[in-house]
Amino acid sequence: MYDGEDALDRALFALPLEEPPEGLRASILMATSYRPAPAFSFLELGAIGVAGALAVWFVVLLVLGGGSLFVHTLATISSVISRALASPSTLAWLAAGCATALWLSLFNGFAPVTATSYRSGRRAGR
């Protein structure tokens, strides 16, 4: 099917090639392998964006004269949280959860579940 393939290969290999520009390899490596890590991860950028949006919302709220409404809202939220945490059943569940987390972390030794990988059929002596 490809009878003229050898002639085409010879013609391609006979073409004169230009030398690459100076520093091409270094610039490719700097753009790929040696590229510095980004300053922030995606989740950190999202958290910064949310915090910035909340800050702008607070400033606009205070500038428009909603300061007293904002203070009243914070007082209501804090009273609901304090009433919820003052409940004996909530405190008992929180204590049980903390005790379970502490017991499991002590039992595991603060190690990940899959600490080492194991390959079947391979021995350490080889």
Image (cartoon, grey):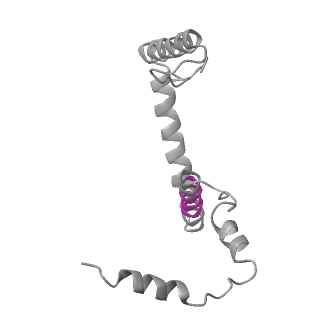
Which picture quadrant has residue 61? bottom right
Query: Camera-side residue: 49 or 86?
Result: 49
State which quarter of the image contains the C terminus.
Answer: top right
* Residue drawn at the location 69% of the way across and 77% of the way down: 24
Quarter the N terminus occupies: bottom left
* Magenta segment: 47-57
Residue pictured at 49% horizontal, 31% vertical: 81
Q: What kind of secondary structure does the magenta stretch mostly adopt?
A: helix
The total number of labels drawn is 0
Residue in the foreground of this view, choosing between 11 and 80: 11
x then y, percent, for residue 101: 52, 16
Would you place residue 101 above or below residue 68 in this image? above
Taking the magenta stretch, the answer to whether it contains residue 48 is yes
Q: Nearer the viewer, residue 39 or 120?
A: 120
Residue furthest left in the image: 1
Identify the residue shown where x is 56% and y is 60%: 49
Instruction: Single out the residue that lies furthest toward the right.
Output: 22
User: Residue 8 appears at what percent x and percent y?
Assistant: 41, 86
Q: Is residue 85 magenta?
A: no
**Where does residue 26 sit, x and y in percent of width and height?**
73, 71
Nearer-the-camera pick, 112 or 119: 119
Q: Give residue 19's quadrant in the image.
A: bottom right
- x, y percent for residue 103: 54, 9
6 vs 62: above or below = below
> Along the horizontal axis of the image, is 17 left or right of 92?
right
